[in-house]
Image (tube, rainbow, N blue to C red):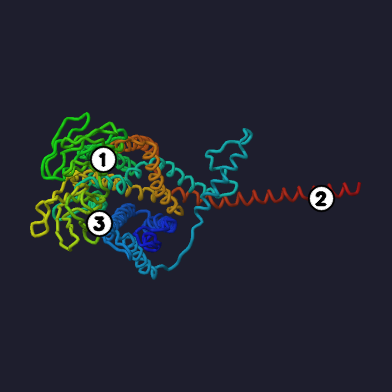
Amino acid sequence: MAISAIHDITDTNRDGTPDNMTFHTAMSMLGLILIALGTGGIKPCVAAFGGDQFEEHQEKQRSTFFSIFYLSINAGSLLSTLITPILRAQECGIYSKQSCFPLAFGVPAALMVVALSACWNNIKSCGKSKCMIAVFSLLQFAIRNRFNHRSKQHPKREHWMDWAEEKYDKLLIAQVKMVLKVLFLYIPLPMFWALFDQQGSRWTLQATTMDGNFGAFIIQPDQMQIVNPILIVIMVPIMDSAVYPLIKKCGLNFTPLRRMTVGMLLASLAFVAAALLQIQIDRTVPNFPSSSQTQVKFLNLENTPVPVVVEGQEPFVVPGFNSSNNYMTLDTENVTVSAGGRNATAYFQKESRHTVLINADRMLQTLNDITEKPNQGMNAIRFVNGFRSHLNFSVKSDHLGPIAPLQASDYFSVTHGKASFTIENEEGQTCHYILQLGFGSSYTVLIPNTFTFGESCTENIKAIQDINPNDIHMAWQVIQYFLMTCGEVVFSVTGLDFSYSQAPSNMKSVLQAGWLLTVAVGNIIVLIVAEAGSLPEQWAEYVLFACLLVAVSIIFAVMAYFYTYMDPAEIEAKFMELEPDDKKRKELEMMTKDNLAYVNNETSNNTDVKQTKI
């Protein structure tokens, strides 16, 4: 992943863009495949390995272990969520400086190498389990054998998996039955993860439209996810040492499956909170033009006010060195515009925004404006040169090049805070202009014809706001993160312990893998619902997911009501006692089959002899 993010590898023309995207895409896919294989080997086994360290009578200690285990996972998540955006925000590159994704991927890779080196000496032995192969072989044989004996002349058996008794031990069959019983209960669970994993996608996108200024520090949109692991570190001990004991003292039977149901309902409430917040955010976002509309405003490059008349609109006056206050929405592409008594026909493209420049000769020049909020909470800035000569503009190490008089630069992205711009003329004179920026705004900076270099050079510069900065504070997201985290603690920690306690002794990792598989299916659900739904409003999509999870929670509650908790050790002990007799019975059956085969063979041979004599 780190190598795939180094754009300089294939950037032969040194323009900052890779020339061979196939290479970078292939490396990214290879990285994702390796991550999938690595986590697939680690996650199911490490939880089962930890649970194996406790005896059967240590259920409370084992439950505490899973809480601490989940807490340690989120402690790592806390560090990565905090540090990775900082690493990514650095600028690196050989030919062009860009966000340093190679560093953001490379540091975790290096830390994994260190972790492996630290643990290597503690690895005494290794082995491989054929458990999954045995499970699938048994299932395949049972299904095939049942299909071959589907006629009514064959007596029915208590369970369809009992058709595997001809080949497999009853103990193994009983163990697979226990696993399938729990896996069937897992069918509704992916819906929880479909909501939970949107913290890193939909909720992060929501944060990009919010204000991350907390006064003493600034929170990046993708850093807002840090609230989840922080709350996990706080909530796990509270739930384990205070909430659950209190519920027990109240005489309530808060079983694992009931906990998981409550966790799912809390997650749905989190999305209701996200929907309510999204409604408030949408009220602050500008109304951008639809596919049949265009939006226009006017910018006066001169010091004197200019009266403007747009066909079909009320007349208005554009102040000197300023713009008309708001965009006007038009339903036609060709419009007659009169500026200061001079008529002209302007063409405006549909589903777009435009700024019309009015110069001293009342000539009109159209600029294309952005039609969406800048991504990742950045700010879109452009300069309009109303000065009488060429000007160079730069911010940090980025140079916009010379801008001719009465022309405008392209938009470029600037982070929040104090942005320092340098304006330079052909004689080398400079002017430093500082603009205080929030999150997600857009500005057109006008350099008027009265601009002069010197100590007071910034007095006449006019910053015109095209898109307002984000008004809703990111702190409001803490409510939905709190609800989701409470749901996660009740649902996920309990699920890990439940998966271990209900699994046979030799299939702990199998059931943990099944538990983790629900996470992957949940991510697929997000893709299907998001693509198939095509809801125009984001808040409506949040409500849709919340309703789906409530419906699934009801189904899961009904399934949990009819579920009977098992003691795998007791069941296995029962079949272990019967196993010797079962083996003797199978040996006798095999001997009988062999004898019958021998008799049939002898009979066949004798018949051949008689036929030869005849």
Residue 569 coordinates in the image, percent (x, y):
43, 51
Residue 276 seen in this snapshot: no
Residue 487, above or below 18: above
Q: Decide: few, some or many residues near mark 3? Use Cα within 10 Å; few <14, some 14-19, many ≥20.
A: some
Q: Decide: few, some or many residues near mark 2? Use Cα within 10 Å; few <14, some 14-19, many ≥20.
A: few
Residue 76 seen in this snapshot: yes
Q: Which of 246 and 542 is in front in this view?
A: 542
According to the picture, the residue beneath numbered tag 1 turns out to be 353
Residue 563 coordinates in the image, percent (x, y):
40, 39
Q: Earlier in the sequence, mark 1 or mark 3?
A: 1
Which label was assigned to residue 605? 2
Residue 422 coordinates in the image, percent (x, y):
18, 59
Residue type at numbered disc 2: Asn
Residue type at numbered disc 3: Leu
Q: How far is the residue under mark 3 from the one under mark 2?
A: 98 Å
Mark 1 falls on what kind of element?
strand
Residue 320 coordinates in the image, percent (x, y):
12, 43
Q: How far is the residue under mark 1 from the one under mark 2?
A: 95 Å
Side (left or right) of 484 relative to 153 = left
Q: Do the residues labelled 1 and 3 touch (CB within 8 Å)?
A: no
Q: Decide: few, some or many residues near mark 1? Use Cα within 10 Å; few <14, some 14-19, many ≥20.
A: many
Q: Earlier in the sequence, mark 3 or mark 2?
A: 3
Residue type at numbered disc 1: Arg
Q: Earlier in the sequence, mark 1 or mark 2?
A: 1
